[in-house]
Image: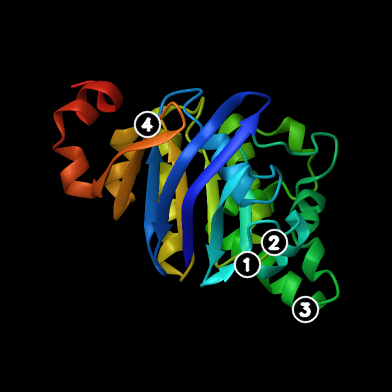
Amino acid sequence: MLEVRDLRVRFGTFYALDGVSLSVKEGEIVVLLGANGAGKSTLFRTISGLHAPAGGAILLEGQDVTRWPAHRLVAAGIAQAPEGKHLFPEVSVGKNLRLGAYVRRRDVEGVRSTMDEVFQLFPVLREKERDAAGTLSGGQQQMLAIGRALMAKPRLLLLDEPSLGLAPLVVEEVFASIQKINEGGTSVLLAEQNAHAALKVAHRGYVIEEGTVSLSGGRGELMGNEEVRRAYIGI
């Protein structure tokens, strides 16, 4: 589904990403673990076409999409729910969702059907469809951010820190929804600091430190790794 090869991103003389390689197979949930400033968001923004790489390649189903603009990548099947949600707070929940379907806006019936799917996944959004997004709780806003990305009907969903700032029970609810999204056929690349929650749902994972991948492996392998447990699980 996705292959990132030796990706480098530079801001001035500083390399935020320095030779990152990873892959996501069709049907997988892959987690990218790392502390703040490790390069997770930079990687996601580069995959999404928001940063131009200084080197390396990004392939979607074998096709080189390294320098495609963001709107073309969304149309090709990549959508992102960014860290911090980036909703339109004064706009209604329903309009925020419909904005996520902009590249499909001519498919009126398809957009309506996808919105129904989002409401089935997150029933609270149907209840608050006419409410301003800024009036929602933090957990509800995260559901809206994920729902907005799903409105593009992606085959690969990028989720950047979906548990950030949420209460433990809400984190469980959000990760349960991520599993349902994946079971529905969408591949997921998930950036997280909450390794315990993320590795419960992920098939594989990578650890990124200072712009490079330092470790990779299956769920059990990473859960059992002493360094990962100490740094990201706290045990």
Mark 4–mark 2 distance (CA, rounded to whole Å): 27 Å
Labelled pair 4, 2 in contact (Cβ < 8 Å): no
Q: What secondary structure is marked by label 4?
A: loop
Mark 2–mark 1 distance (CA, rounded to whole Å): 5 Å
The x, y position of residue 208, in whole percent, is 39, 34
Crowdedness of circle 2 by 10 Å Cα count: few (<14), some, many (20+)? many
Labelled pair 2, 1 in contact (Cβ < 8 Å): yes
The x, y position of residue 178, in whole percent, is 45, 53
If you read the primary sequence from the N terminus, does the residue marked by circle 1 or circle 3 appear first?
Answer: 1
Callout 4 amino acid: Asn
Q: Is residue 56 left or right of residue 125?
A: left
Q: Tell me, for residue 77, which label it has, or none.
A: 1
Q: Is residue 190 visible?
A: yes
Q: Which residue is mark 4?
A: 194
Labelled pair 1, 3 in contact (Cβ < 8 Å): no
Q: Is residue 113 left or right of residue 63?
A: right
Q: What secondary structure is marked by label 2?
A: helix
Vertically, is 99 above or below 170?
below
Crowdedness of circle 4 by 10 Å Cα count: few (<14), some, many (20+)? some
